[in-house]
Image (cartoon, helix red, strand yellow):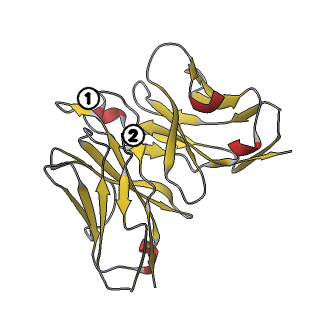
Amino acid sequence: KAGVTQTPRYLIKTRGQQVTLSCSPISGHRSVSWYQQTPGQGLQFLFEYFSETQRNKGNFPGRFSGRQFSNSRSEMNVSTLELGDSALYLCASSPQLAGVPLTYEQYFGPGTRLTVT
Amino acid sequence: AQSVAQPEDQVNVAEGNPLTVKCTYSVSGNPYLFWYVQYPNRGLQFLLKYITGDNLVKGSYGFEAEFNKSQTSFHLKKPSALVSDSALYFCAVRDGETRITGGGNKLTFGTGTQLKVEL
């Protein structure tokens, strides 16, 4: 099976702009989670989607949002970008059956490196 | 709320020697624990997990981890380190609040430990 794919891999934006990142989970995986990785804060959970519904949300401002489509692909959006939003954004997928995990590990994509100038 | 601590920012070990990367956790209920590895400019790769059962868990690439409930630890080990094992290692715990319902995949990560294996 193909792994988790994320596009684009690299992105440079200017403060105040908005950005949309995309994630395609492993085929058959219906849970998609997003994480932000920075040198200062480490890995932090942003949100999780299952069956097009947000199931968990981390402690991030409302400028960070996401959605999931019927084919389980997910997008996250960051509006009004700030310098501190520069980070590696990681997407992870995991298999679920009726909302219950089939396995508990998550499979991560290579990430999108966002640089805000 | 759950938390994970990795007390060492960096661990240095000679190739062929055993390695240990330390992790301690704090959760309200039974822990679901994981180790991931990250190579430069890459995402995280799953190494192993502890959900229940045997306290010694075996994973990918010859790694294993020992779950110790009394010490709330989940240390990563390998009997003989390779230079190619050099990478950033993360310990993580799954959100116990959603464990009961079976839903929810929020992971809380430690700060990471840089492993350097030298010849």
Q: Is residue A57 visible?
A: no
Q: What chain letter is assigned to the residue under label 1? A: B
User: Residue A20: x, y in percent?
Assistant: 28, 70
Q: Mark 2 Cα within 10 Å, few/some/many (few <14, many 20+)? A: many
The quarter of the picture where the N terminus of chain A appears is: top left
Q: Is residue B83 visible?
A: yes
Residue at 39% from the left image edge and 79% from the top image edge: A82
Discs 1, 2: same chain? no
Q: What chain letter is assigned to the residue under label 2? A: A
Q: Which mark is residue A106?
A: 2
User: Residue A40: x, y in percent?
Assistant: 55, 64
Residue at 54% from the left image edge and 46% from the top image edge: B110
Q: Could you tell me which secondary element the residue under label 1 belongs to?
A: loop
Amino acid under disc 1: Gly
Quick check: A78 left or right of B57?
left
User: Residue A61: x, y in percent?
Assistant: 30, 67
Residue that mark 1 sits on: B102
Q: CA distance from mark 1 to mark 2?
A: 14 Å
